[in-house]
Amino acid sequence: MRTKLLLIGVAALLAGCATTPAFRYQVPDQPEGSSGYAEKPGWSTQRFAVAAANPLATDAGYQILRAGGSAVDAAIAVQMVLALVEPQSSGIGGGAFMMHFNGAEVKAFDGRETAPAAANEGLFLGLDGKPMAFYDAVVGGRSVGTPGTVRMLEMVHRQYGTLPWATLLEPAIVLAESGFKVSARLNTLLKTEVHLKKDPVAAAYFYKPDGTPHDVGYVLRNPALAAVLRKVAASGSKALHEGEVAQAIVNKVRQHASNPGQLSMADLADYKAIKRPALCHDYRANARDYRICGFPPPSSGAIAIGQILGILNQTNAAQLPLENGLPSAPWLHLYTEAARLAFADRAQYLGDPDFVTPPAGSWLSLLNPEYLAERGRLIGQAPDAPSMKTAKPGTPKGTPTAFAPMPEQIEYGTSHISIVDGNGRAVAMTSTIEDAFGARQMVNVQPGLSGGFLLNNELTDFSFAPRDGAGLPVANRVEPGKRPRSSMAPTLVFDKGTGAVLMSGGSPGGALIIHFVAKTLYGVLNWGLTPQTAINLPNFASLNGPTVLEDKRFPATTIDTLKARGHEVREANMTSGLQAISRSPNQARPAWLGGADPRREGIVMGD
Ligand code: GLU
């Protein structure tokens, strides 16, 4: 994938930026990808691999790995480049979850945004006491949570970084100053975006004077972001969370003309990333035993995926192979029924663990095999058994709950990075500013320079309605300092016997992340597909309502069979952004197989 490396005046561009002799960033050729469905070859590598949603970001990680950087080092470089080239999805104004395996143990690093200390459960209620319309809440300062991505990366780097922190920011700084070509996907999203232009900083950066977005291939420079990244390179997260950059963030949020927020300098200064135990469970497929590790609450991702896979293993799903390369109607019935059960529990129980008590005293109660067997018995398995349509939450160990269920809400945006390095370490990191272009607020610290960085709207991942009609609180309601519930599901899979890491994967897509990742895991572990073929499979989902199928990817017979069993089938665009790397099953070379979603611009690189 790496052609015509172009060495530009790196030394001059890096003046003022700490460098090491071991690493010299080389700006690669910049391809112009497609923004629709573009077939990808699938990749294989022998020693290490990096997969990300944009070729420039993947390349930055690749160069870091080649220079001897760790998986964490590469992830930092990838993330900083993504902030520049995929600003709609993630960045230094957002939050992220990283799963990390150091060769011996797996940990979860939480850089999720927090609600300001001044926020309360009425944050998204209008004057009439009713939940606000989604975009009325999103656009402006109200939805902005305290960013956590940089603090989290700094925390992980202190433990697992090999190259100096400043070195890892070089690719993003060089590209921000020399410019990157606007990709087809960024251009397409800018064309359909209606709120971003209302922010004068964003309008001047992303759009031409006539209001149309910069063309595909236009070389866009972001010197204002480069200036902030230089500060972060020199002083770490302090440069973002204190001083003039923090003040610029706070001003942007609090001084919004029509929809101000409450973020304060103290919120930024006090933000702490958290190292959590990974949430792991056993999984058996094709007579092999795996250990699947994902992100614990505040994400609902790992628990929901674990429930779906665990419940499916209580049914005859394993006897239902792909038909003509596609999941069959009987399998989709079982899958979506398991999903309904999982999403009912998700709505009932999941929230920030620092605020919400888990059912029966442990989140693992939701993955207990006996509980999953009990849930699985609710699924009709006879060939004509009807769909349950809507599932009710269960009660693990019979414990009653103190919470009201949360209604499903819209979620979008986000980016996923998977990396394995040459020393047995692995990363799965999903990073977000929530909706596409977040809160549509671009922070610029030096008005003389163009560009800046976008702020998240992560607080709209909280339940807008804090209580049900009877006054019972929703677990995921807004509370000061709390992290909103997430669906992000960065996942690492291990061989249960040897402990070797076998797979890293994840996706953007809001609540659908859970289904995108479950599909990919099932495809690789149960159906024996390569990551690329598993990612290519059409998407399918249920959020405890209709059965949703990726538009025009399933035959009419499948849809008719599901309808005959009472499924309300809807076809929809389901733009996953999966990236996955898995160990080649036959032990022979190549050691790693990589896949990137044909629905977006990602690629995999490695040696
Ligand atoms: N904000 C969402 C979450 O954390 C992710 C949004 C998306 O991927 O589209 O679950």
Image (cartoon, rainbow, N blue to C red):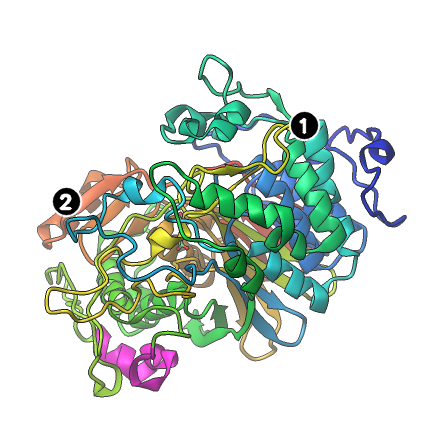
The reply to whether discs 1 and 2 touch (Cβ–Cβ < 8 Å) is no
Which residues, given as a range, are shown in magenta?
357-376
Percent across and percent down for residue 125 are 23, 52
> Quarter of the image holding residue 355?
bottom left
User: Compared to 131, does 346 lie above or below?
Assistant: below
The residue depicted at 30 percent of the width and 40 percent of the height is: 135
Task: Left or right? Give the position of 285 relative to 238.
Answer: left
- Amino acid marked by disc 2: Asp
The residue depicted at 55 percent of the width and 28 percent of the height is: 183
Q: How many marks?
A: 2
Percent across and percent down for residue 95 are 50, 54
User: Compared to 317, does 435 lie above or below?
Assistant: above
Q: Is residue 59 visible?
A: no
**Residue at label 2?**
560
Q: Is residue 486 visible?
A: yes
> Quarter of the image holding residue 31?
top right
User: Compared to 384, does 53 lie above or below?
Assistant: above
Task: Left or right? Give the position of 457 relative to 251.
Answer: left
Farthest residue to the right: give it: 21
Query: In terms of depth relative to the viewer, which is nearer, 111 or 146?
Result: 146
The residue depicted at 47 percent of the width and 29 percent of the height is: 35
- Amino acid marked by disc 1: Gly
Q: Quadrant of the N terminus?
A: top right
- Mark 1 or mark 2: which is in front? 1
